[in-house]
Image (cartoon, rainbow, N blue to C red):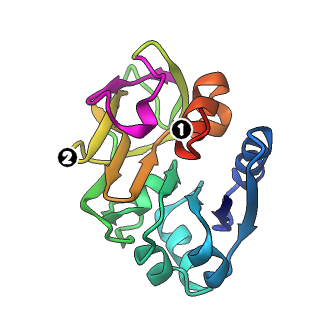
């Protein structure tokens, strides 16, 4: 099984590839539309601003390619936010795969932005494929200032307000946290995406 990791220029590309190597996945980092289209699984990582990431995807002609993917796709961090229609960050249009707008988290003076550190999830459904072997006691590592709406959330988390921690829409799933930096729980989630349990 070939896994294509979309080369979106994010700073987390190396750690994503390393996590896949630990799982003995046949993974390739690519911005080639043909390579991505033919992969059995696709991972869309991202770090930085939504506008810059969309520009990075548009340059090699990947926007329509990603929209048209029919195999399982996993977005990571900014990759989750890019799946939605719009982002308040840079007031930009995103991929439009999932309805809704990503907005800046509203936190009180006692909490900092970005939301950076370990947090737990509240699973909305236990039968999602990504939830296999997971519980509400697992911890995941987050770094973000913007949150996605809850309408398509498989799991939610909280930092001043509830936000979507994992979303799913047809063959597209995504996590707001970094599974590649989330120790055993993150590795289990990636293994679930690869069907390696």
What residue span does the magenta drawing correspond to? Answer: 117-135
**Secondary element at tag 2:** loop
Q: Which mark is residue 192?
A: 1
Q: In this view, which residue lies farthest toward the top? A: 137
Q: Is 156 or 127 nearer to us in this picture?
A: 127
* Mark 1 vs 2: CB contact within 8 A: no
Q: Position of residue 46 (x, y in %)?
A: 58, 57
Is residue 12 found inside the magenta-colored segment of the image?
no
Point out the tag, 1 or 2, that comes first from the N-terminus.
2
Q: Position of residue 130 (x, y in %)?
A: 45, 37
- Where 184 sits versus 130, above or below? above
Q: Quadrant of residue 143?
A: top right
Q: Could you tell me which quadrant the C terminus lies in?
A: top right
Q: Quadrant of residue 3?
A: bottom right
Q: Could you tell me which quadrant the N terminus lies in?
A: bottom right
Looking at the image, which residue is at 25% across and 47% down? 152
Q: CA distance from mark 1 to mark 2?
A: 23 Å
Q: Which mark is residue 11?
A: none
Q: Kindly report which numbered mark, 1 or 2, lies closer to the viewer in this rendering.
A: 1
Q: Position of residue 191 (x, y in %)?
A: 60, 38
Q: Position of residue 68 (x, y in %)?
A: 41, 78
Q: Is residue 51 visible?
A: yes
Q: Which residue is mark 2?
A: 151
Looking at the image, which residue is at 23% across and 42% down? 150
Looking at the image, which residue is at 67% across and 25% down? 183
Looking at the image, which residue is at 33% across and 33% down? 155
**Secondary element at tag 1:** helix
Is residue 133 found inside the magenta-colored segment of the image?
yes
């Amino acid at each position: 099984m070939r896994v294509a990791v979309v080369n979106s220029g994010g700073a987390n590309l190396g750690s994503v590839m390393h996590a896949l190597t630990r799982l003995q996945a046949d993974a390739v980092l690519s911005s080639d539309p043909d390579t991505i289209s033919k992969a059995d699984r696709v991972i869309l990582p991202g770090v930085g601003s939504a506008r810059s990431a969309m520009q990075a995807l548009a340059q090699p002609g990947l926007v329509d390619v990603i929209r048209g993917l029919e195999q399982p796709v996993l977005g990571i961090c900014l990759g989750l936010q890019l799946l939605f229609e719009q982002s308040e960050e840079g007031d930009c249009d995103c991929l439009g795969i999932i309805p809704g707008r990503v907005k800046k988290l509203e936190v009180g003076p006692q909490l900092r932005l970005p939301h950076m550190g370990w947090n737990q999830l509240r699973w909305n459904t236990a039968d999602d494929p990504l939830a296999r072997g997971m519980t509400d006691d697992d911890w995941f590592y987050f770094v973000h200032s913007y949150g996605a709406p809850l309408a398509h959330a498989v799991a939610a988390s909280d930092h001043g307000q509830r936000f979507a921690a994992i979303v799913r829409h047809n063959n597209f799933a995504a996590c707001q946290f970094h599974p590649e930096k989330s120790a055993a729980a993150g590795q289990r989630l990636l293994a679930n995406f690869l069907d390696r349990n």
